[in-house]
Amino acid sequence: MSDSPWWASRFAALAAIDPDLAGALDRQAEAQVDLLERLLELRPGDPLLDVGCGGGRHSILLQERGLAVTGVDLAPELLELAQRRWAARHPGHDGPQWVQCDMRDLSPQGPFAAAILLDRTLGVFDDDADHLRTLSNIADRLRGGGVSCSSSSIPTTGPTATSPGTSPLARSLRALTSSGPTASMP
């Protein structure tokens, strides 16, 4: 995976050490999915795009609740982990659609009722243009009235700290939210 961006290589390497490092299907994930259902007003059958789905932590739980989930990730190792996790929980049953692609160039077209970007998905780019491109591509795939929800870790102390609302990611999110509804998770 030497040609992969650092984030794809790093998360795949962590998952190779311990699959739960790619995100465990645990109480925290269940609580996040509970919150997503309330925030995004999701209903069974709604199509949902999970950008940077990794090992399927949220995709699997949301599919189990009746949503039509498409999980995308750049790392094939993480998508394989997600497929194995689904198969172990639901042998012989169709699950989320797993798509390998770069989040800056999303191949699933939608339209989606909602999109999620959770657990360190945003904030990996050095260039604001890549954040804007990603968020714009997601917005283009939402149906009318569709919403997106993200969680991210933006440093607020230390050498890479930013003032609240002034980081490249915060500026990118403001640019996207000015054109449509979004929600942010802690």
Image (tube, helix red, strand yellow):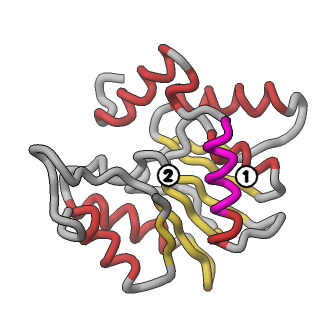
Whether the magenta-drawn stretch holds residue 181 is answered as: no
- Which residue is rendered at x = 63% and y = 67% of the image? 110
Taken as a whole, is the magenta stretch helix, strand or loop? helix
Residue under label 1, please give it: 62
Q: Position of residue 151 (x, y in %)?
A: 45, 57
**10 Å crowding of disc 2: few (<14), some (14-19), many (20+):** many
Q: Amino acid at mark 1?
A: Leu
**Earlier along the polypeptide chain: callout 2 or callout 1?**
1
Q: Position of residue 44 (x, y in %)?
A: 83, 64
Quadrant holding the N terminus = top left
Q: Residue placed farthest to the top in the image? A: 17
Q: Position of residue 108 (x, y in %)?
A: 58, 58
Q: Is residue 174 visible?
A: yes
> What span is colored magenta in the figure?
26-36
Label disc, if present, on residue 138 of the rendered structure: none
- Which residue is rendered at x = 45% and y = 26% of the image? 12
Residue under label 2, please give it: 118
